[in-house]
Image: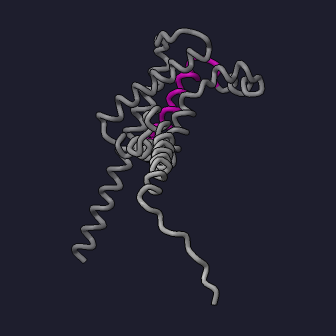
Amino acid sequence: MVRIPLPPPLNLPDRALLAPFWIGAVLCSARAVNCAHAPRRRYGITHHSSSRVSAFRRQALALLRVGWPVFALLGILWFPFDWLSEVWPAFGAPFRMVFRNAHDHFVGHAIFFLIVGLLLLVYVPALRRPHWYFPALVVAALAQETIQALARGATPTYTDINAFTGDAIGGLSAFALWFIIATFITIGRLRLSGRKAHP
């Protein structure tokens, strides 16, 4: 069996000679770690801030996933159909046949706010309280008139009393209709629970 001679162990002077190389390696590794974290420090990116951004993104996606019907209804409510009837003749002809005068315009606003108001009351329980619903109705009417005016290239003046009256009647009718429906549902549930309690 052939034994391979091992090199003799380093003595103290040899280790002293290699010390600068070890120190240089440690400094280089520290500098590499420092360079890796430099962009995070430069742009204020920390683990805490990145976790906050990811949490905000998850909340936004969850809100969009749950609330997309509300956004769709508001988009339909606020869409400038008057502008679309002017730029798209195929839509403008039947639109003008339905909304021929101020009375038709009033009826259209009332029916539109009635349908959208009922759907929002069904989907958003918080709006079933008057102190939330009525301010939301005012904001929705003002936003609609603002978008319509800006789409025409005009400054919003909020002087279309005919449209605002239709919006108010439609929105109030939606809330009253929902209140009647909810009352009948509550009475029916109470009668059903009473029958179960007293067979």
Pick whichever, 17 or 159, lies toward us. 17
Quick check: 66 left or right of 175? right
Q: Position of residue 38 (x, y in %)?
A: 47, 37
Number of numbered discs visible in the structure rendering: 0
In the rendered image, is residue 42 in sight?
yes
Task: Name the image quarter holding residue 84.
Answer: top right
Image: 29 above or below 171: below
Instruction: Spot the residue most to the bottom.
Output: 1
Q: Residue at x 50, y 12 (%)?
A: 156
Pick whichever, 7 or 199, lies toward us. 7
* Range drawn in magenta: 99-121
- Residue 199 part of the magenta segment: no
* Quadrant containing the C terminus in the rendered view: bottom left
* Quadrant containing the N terminus in the rendered view: bottom right
- Residue 100 part of the magenta segment: yes
Pick whichever, 1 or 33, lies toward us. 1
Task: Name the image quarter holding residue 179.
Answer: top left
Q: Residue at x 51, y 19 (%)?
A: 145
Q: Position of residue 75 (x, y in %)?
A: 55, 33
Task: Name the image quarter holding residue 47.
Answer: top left
Q: Position of residue 54 (x, y in %)?
A: 46, 46
Q: Identify the colour scheme used.
A: one colour
Quick check: 152 left or right of 70? right
Q: Residue at x 61, y 17 (%)?
A: 151
Q: Residue at x 57, y 33 (%)?
A: 76
Q: Main secondary structure of the magenta part?
A: helix
Image: 86 above or below 128: above
Q: Position of residue 111 (x, y in %)?
A: 52, 33
Pick whichever, 118 or 131, lies toward us. 131
In the rendered image, is residue 33 in sight?
no
